[in-house]
Image (cartoon, rainbow, N blue to C red):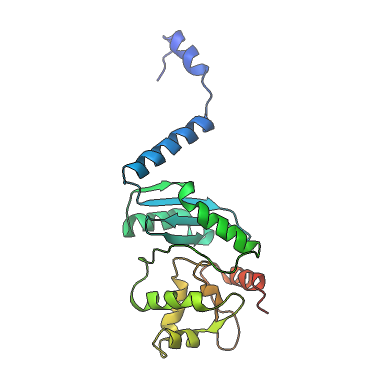
Amino acid sequence: MTSSSDPGAERLFASLPPNDDDAHARLHARLVEAAQREGVLDIGYRTIDSPVGPLLLAATEAGLVRVAYAREDHDGVLAGLAAAVSPRILNAPARLDAVARQLDEYFARTRQHFDLRLDLRLSKGFRRQVLAHLPEIGYGRTESYAQVATASGSPKAVRAVGTACATNPLPIVVPCHRVVRSDGSFGGYVGGPETKRALLDLEGVA
């Protein structure tokens, strides 16, 4: 803190820019590098813009652990990751470069399958069984909640399939948007019904 009785110090601080974004970015990059080198960066995250709004991407060393729409509250999602996985979280865009590139390709219709390591620790039991099946629903195709329940080994667990889709921690990459009602209507979606419609339109689902 400067004092009016120290004009030299006032001149020194007055010569500094109020915000030095470049310096801040360099310091942050060095912090991320050091954390990764010392093995104390448990979760790296970044946000990207997409045709369905900003997406938060987060990854552990094991793989992609979270994709979140803005409506899920990105700050709340990060707090949830800190509680469920680890509080050692940093904005580390490079860790998510491959994910961001593949999502760009998906939205550009040049990619139909994701080739990424996934960390499914946020889903347990039957929900995880459902998530394991969802990538088997091909691009541009849909299955009903009942069909997914049968494929996941519990034909009567239709409502549980809905819950698994609604709590899917990796939407888009694990395509719960391809699960629709038996009458063909789209049903709910973690990203909102308009986003589900946009993704199915993107994939050419009538």
Most extreme residue toward the front is 115
- The number of numbered discs placed on residues in the rendered structure image is 0
Tell me residue 135's x, y (percent). Answer: 50, 74
Q: Nearer the viewer, residue 206 or 17?
A: 206
Residue 110 quadrant: bottom right
Residue nearest the viewer, comparing 183 with 137? 137
Residue at horizontal 49 percent and vertical 36 percent from the top: 25
Asked whether residue 52 is in view, the answer is no
Placement of 88 over or under 66, stated as above or below: above
Please provide percent x and percent y for residue 129.
39, 78
120 or 38: which is nearer to us?
A: 38
- Image quadrant holding the C terminus, namely bottom right
Q: Position of residue 162 (x, y in %)?
A: 46, 79
Which residue is at a point 66% across and 61% down the rendered structure image?
108
Query: Does residue 47 sit above or below 65 in this rendering?
Result: above
Residue 158: which quarter of the image? Answer: bottom left
Q: Nearer the viewer, residue 30 or 53?
A: 30
Query: Which residue is painted at 51% across and 17% down in the image?
Result: 14
Quarter holding the N terminus? top left
Q: Point out residue 11 in the picture as x, y percentages from the top left corner.
A: 49, 12
Q: Relative to residue 156, is residue 177 drawn left or right?
A: right
Q: Residue at x 65, y 77 (%)?
A: 205
Residue 73: tell me if it is visible: yes
